[in-house]
Amino acid sequence: MKNKQVSLLASIISLSLLLSSQANAAAENAGEFYLGAKTGWANFDFCETGDCDDDAWGGSVYGGYQFNSWISLEGGYNYLGNSKSYVGNQVTDRTKVDNGELGLKLDWNLGSAWNLFGKIGGTYNDVHSQRYNGSNTVKSDNTSLMAGAGLEYQLSHNWRVRTEYQWFDDVGEKGTGQSDINYVSVGLSYYFGEDKNAAAAAAVVAAPIVAAEPEPVVEPEPAPLPLPAATLSTGAFEHDSTALTGSAKESLTPVATYLEQNPEVNVDVIGYTDSTGAAAYNQKLSEKRAKAAADYLESEGVENSRINVEGRGEENPIADNKTAEGREKNRRIEVFYSK
């Protein structure tokens, strides 16, 4: 029985030692002290023959310091109850055990709330064996090995609940019925530390919320009108003529379409001539050419009230009037959108 217990505990503690180096480095309770209490069932191995009541209620208090995410130093006091020996119905021996323990607690975080642990350390045992055959109470004390394993669940940053198994090796001396003790318990621990994540969240909530000033609404600038809308130059008019050529009409057709699609837009039609002939004659000729272009736009559906007609004679030449090519370019109509 004893060899099986040792083997089981050695396996559990070895597993905890193996896994502890992989624990979460950001464990919440690192660097904090804790206190706790637990209660449970103790079993004694005092009696190998005869009638024995080797089960008892036990209770403990404990405390420790969590160095980091995987190791703590933990100590405590355990009251492990009484075992009884019988002859017939008569109690012949009552043995009470309590001890103090100190050891290392090795943690393995199974997730955000669950924690597996192993314990290894020693105990100082105080054993009182009261005999009912007329002899005095026999007392003994000794030290022994303690090992254990358990499971914890984190209720909150400060509170954990644990269930635990401990084995105490050879408690007491021969005169008081030296025995191994098995102890299964359930406990509650309190950690003395602040939840840094909750404090940070509270600070964020408590911080004054400053409403951002709304960005000024900037109205988008209207797209610029395509100016000039059209220039009817080379090939727009024959010499000394006011009749629009076919190519001139083709240039004015997109203008009429745009004006139809944008009824808020008007148009300025300005006529020019080359420098051949008298200036007064050229002025009249430029007005007639502008009027010819306006008439065409009106025939395409543009209202007359949206068309402004102007003649500027031989002003503002765009080419050299000394050449035939230059004079042909200067005989032109320029069309501008306006609002």
Image: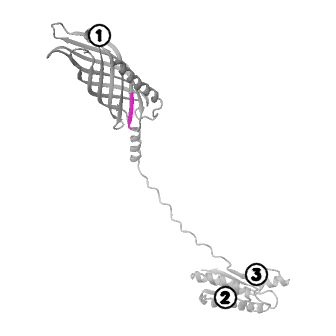
- Residue 135 vs residue 293, the one in the foreground: 135
- The 10 Å Cα crowd at callout 2, few under 14, some 14 to 19, many 20 or more, is some
Confirm whether residue 248 shows in the render.
Answer: yes
In magenta, the rendered stretch is 113-117
The residue labelled by disc 3 is 316
The residue labelled by disc 2 is 309
Contact check, label 2 and label 1, Cβ < 8 Å: no
Residue in the picture at 65% in, 76% down: 226
> Which one is in front in this view, the residue at disc 2 or the one at disc 3?
2
Residue in the picture at 82% in, 82% down: 326
Query: x%, y% of residue 182?
Result: 30, 22
Residue 323 placement, left or right of 136? right
Quarter in which the N terminus is drawn: top left
Secondary structure at badge 3 equals loop
Q: Residue furthest left?
A: 89
Residue 308 placement, left or right of 312? left
| Residue type at tag 2 | Val
Residue 141 got which mark? none
Asked if residue 174 is positioned above or below residue 298 in the image, the reply reads above
The residue labelled by disc 1 is 173
Residue 193 occupies quadrant: top left
Query: x%, y% of residue 34?
Result: 35, 29
Query: x%, y% of residue 207?
Result: 41, 47
> Which one is in front in this view, the residue at disc 1 or the one at disc 3?
1
Residue 195 occupies quadrant: top left
State which tag comes first along the sequence, 2 or 1: 1
